[in-house]
Image (cartoon, rainbow, N blue to C red):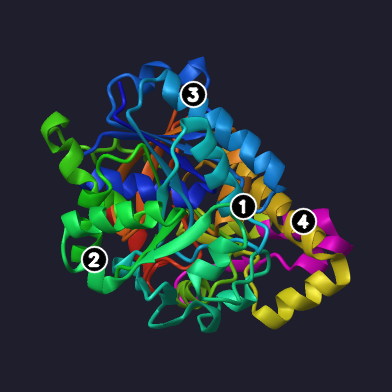
Amino acid sequence: MPLLGCIADDFTGATDLASQLVSIGMRTVQTIGVPDEGLADELKDVDAVVVALKSRTIPAEEAIEQSLAALECLQARGCEQFYFKYCSTFDSTSEGNIGPVTDALMDALDVPFTVACPALPANRRTVYNGYLFAGGVLLNESGMQDHPLTPMTDANLVRVMGSQTRHRVGLVDLDGVRQGSEAVRQRFDALQAEGVGVAILDAIEQRDLETLGEACRDMTLVTAGSGLALGLHARWANELTGDSAAELPATPGREAILSGSCSRATLAQIEHAQAHYPHYRLDALALAEDYQGRIDEALTLAREHLDASPVLIYASASPDNVKKAQQTLGVQEAGEIVERALGEVAATLVSELGVRRLLVAGGESSGAVVSALNVKGLQIGPSIDPGVPWIVTLGSPERLALALKSGNFGAEDFMTKAWESMP
């Protein structure tokens, strides 16, 4: 039976966490949504199950319902510890959904105290004195303040989490972390005695996450980005088989890149890839004027070039262009038309044009693509960059290799070097 049951609030975040678990030797399967009995065999001989939800930006009530359904399934599978995974940039709004889902999971598991730890130093996400830094600057100066769906305008996680949860929020600062795992556990006890229900954890280096993971090893529920998973390894070390967890079957076929992320990192990756591959931009306003015409143009480009190289089809845009589309179409409508277009393009690339390897950039975009392809489960393989593994589909008639990339992840050459690490 699985040892660790994980609930992720978007698809790229789920693969990020699954990749970290594989790196510490845990045989890991990711499911798209709550798994059904069709994946029962794939969930038998694994150490961890990561349930990927698309709950980050939906109404809080729906996010809670989906998360509790995932929890119930993981409990039925026999999981011993539970991990609520969100983005290392704490993507949310003042209303949620991180806080409301955390509250609901705490209630369901009858736990009075948990932690919140989005830090991922390998990708330059650090927390100091409760403030979240991304790329060396405060979160609200990193570009996340321009996120089209979850603009992050406050880097103080005690304040942000405090606005979302009904629990009192406290802090375990770096000085306390550097005193070791036993001191951190004592700090947990002191915070609980003060009435704190959720503790924000400082971490600026990998060694901090290892200390925190050891301190959290006996918690029934943790909430975090993917980084804390690396520190939980000690709890499971004696129960792992030692078998290679990252091997994937070869998946030959044509290759394509789809992107809807508007993050600074993805925009730089697209600029780099444009110098190497044929490319087409799906503009939200142009889609609204002539949806099918723009889809047909993108697929025509693919038909003309897929034999020779990967193709890049993207809806990513600068903050100014995103705001213009949102002002014209509405925030929700602008996002939905892009997601629908990327999903339809992905489905045609696979069903008609022989694409079997897909890179997808952006959490919402990845959700749209795997939904359009009717993917149910994923086997996790080797990393391309920290937090971005290759994965292959499970329970599908046609095996596909996918890389689902969080918008802010990956080096500038991610979209060109990724193919080298896939069998």
Mark 3 and mark 4 lie on one chain; the one further toward the N terminus is: 3
Q: Quadrant of the C terminus?
A: top left
Q: Mark 2 belongs to which amino acid?
A: Val
Calculate the distance from the C-alpha at mark 4 to the C-alpha at mark 1: 23 Å
Residue 233 location, quadrant? top left
Does the magenta portion include 279? yes
Question: In this figure, which residue is indicated by the disc labeled 4?
Answer: 337
Q: Nearer the viewer, mark 4 or mark 2?
A: 2
Calculate the distance from the C-alpha at mark 3 to the C-alpha at mark 4: 32 Å
Which residues are the magenta region? 274-298
- Secondary structure, mark 3, is helix
Residue at position x 27%, y 22% from top?
A: 45
Mark 2 and mark 3 lie on one chain; the one further toward the N terminus is: 3
Q: Mark 1 belongs to which amino acid?
A: Asn
Mark 1 surroundings: few (<14), some (14-19) or many (≥20) residues within 10 A: many
Q: Mark 4 belongs to which amino acid?
A: Ile
Magenta span: chief secondary structure = helix
| 228 displayed left or right of 314 | left
Mark 1 and mark 3 lie on one chain; the one further toward the N terminus is: 3
Q: Nearer the viewer, mark 4 or mark 1?
A: 1
Pointers 2 and 3 in contact (CB under 8 A)?
A: no
Q: Quadrant of the N terminus?
A: top left
Mark 4 surroundings: few (<14), some (14-19) or many (≥20) residues within 10 A: some
Question: In this figure, which residue is indicated by the disc labeled 1?
Answer: 97
Calculate the distance from the C-alpha at mark 2 to the C-alpha at mark 3: 34 Å
Q: Nearer the viewer, mark 1 or mark 2?
A: 2
